[in-house]
Image (cartoon, grey):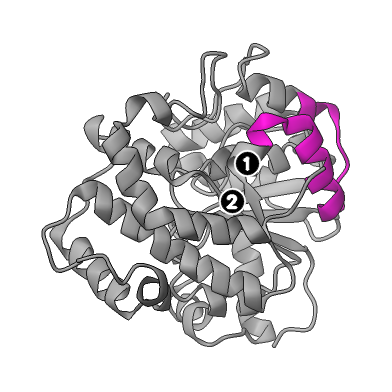
Amino acid sequence: MHKSKNFPIFLLMGFPRSGTTWFSNLINSSESVIYRHELIGRNYSMLGDRVFSELKYAEGLSAADYEIVENAIKKAHIETDKPPFFKKKYGLRKFPKIQYMFWSLAKILPRTARLYDYFYRLRSKHDWKILIKETRSLTDMRSMILGLQPSALLFLVRTPQATILSHLKGVQKKKMGPISPDVKKRLLLEASDSAFFKAHLSHKHLHTELQDIEFYAINWVLYHEKALALKTEFASASIYFYDDIMENPPQQIAQIFSMLGLEICDEVANYIAQSSGQKSNFLKDAGDQYYSVYRDNSFNKDSWMEELTQEEIELINSYCKTMYEELGKLKIQCN
């Protein structure tokens, strides 16, 4: 196991479409945080096959392998550096508009990517804190946590109806693919072996033909069953609820920042206002309207109550309600 590291790591995880990108950028708006977007899930090639395999299966990394991971974290790459950019403490990162210009240039002209890395690579002499967000499967995540040794492990949970509705909209808008037959088979196999399903959902007839909305619900439950196991094992793990944070972002974020040892700065308050439609935003993020962290003042986190039928709401509840309640017992209270 490695004994030291240059940067403390915050590892944030959540089921896809749970608001993790929005939440990540709330933390990223701190002047001392550097955000690495899905370094493991989408950009694992930066680690190399051997080190990525060690991270997934070895339940810990050697000092030499951790150095390789840390070098990947230091690298300024257009796929792990994601707008919006915020004013930071050191170097050219003090000027987010200039960073966005360099990032856009590297995105359009790949040959300039080395230039972007040269100017924005992290230097060990600076006291950065690293935020890595992952929304991929929690399979093998225990080994990855043991390898990365994060200072804080955060899980973000969103109401299952809102999360599943977002998936359904994504498929409808062709932003996301539908659940494939292979994935459906895998989910049914996992559910048949799941201790949670055996204890709480044994009445479900999984051998019958299921609706797609049921497969999303099954996936949501299985994901959070793994999250609960990790929360139980790792003392540094905390559970936060998207809906609670959205109710009162300034108060909630002040508490979260205090727990992470971060200071509130003007960028944090600006982002809260801009991402909730209270204030105009002049810097773009990397997504279109479906993926964007910026919302206008018409955004309603509870729109699922109107957009889903009562039958669909009850169907999701029949799978997810007990798990949602179990997660609620362990959430961090930000009062």
Where residue 227 sits in the image (x, y, percent)? 54, 66
Question: What's the residue at 23%, 32% (across, down)?
Answer: 172
* Relative side of 260 to 247, left or right: right
Nearer to the camera, 103 or 309: 309
Task: Give the foreground label among 1 and 2.
Answer: 2
Question: Along the polypeptide, which appears first: circle 1 or circle 2?
Answer: 1
In the structure shown, which secondary structural element does the residue marked by tag 1 occupy?
Answer: helix
Question: What's the residue at 67%, 27% (across, down)?
Answer: 98
Up/down of 210 relative to 166, above or below: below
Q: Quadrant of the C terminus?
A: top right
Q: Read off the magenta span.
A: 245-269
- For mark 1, what is the residue? 23
- For mark 2, what is the residue? 156
| Amino acid at pointer 1 | Phe
Q: Is residue 191 magenta?
A: no
Residue 74 seen in the figure: no
In the structure shown, which secondary structural element does the residue marked by tag 2 occupy?
Answer: strand
In the rendered image, which quarter is residue 210 located in?
bottom left
Up/down of 48 relative to 211, above or below: below
Up/down of 2 relative to 36, above or below: below
| Amino acid at pointer 2 | Leu
Where residue 212 sits in the image (x, y, percent)? 21, 49
Nearer to the camera, 179 or 47: 179
In the displayed orientation, state which residue is furthest to the front: 203
> Does the CB distance between marks 1 and 2 fall below 8 Å?
yes
Nearer to the camera, 118 or 287: 287
Where residue 232 sits in the image (x, y, percent)? 64, 75
Mark 2 surroundings within 10 Å by alpha-carbon count, few (fewer than 14), some (14 through 19), many (20 or more):
many
Determine the main secondary structure of the stretch shown in magenta: helix
Q: Is residue 268 magenta?
A: yes
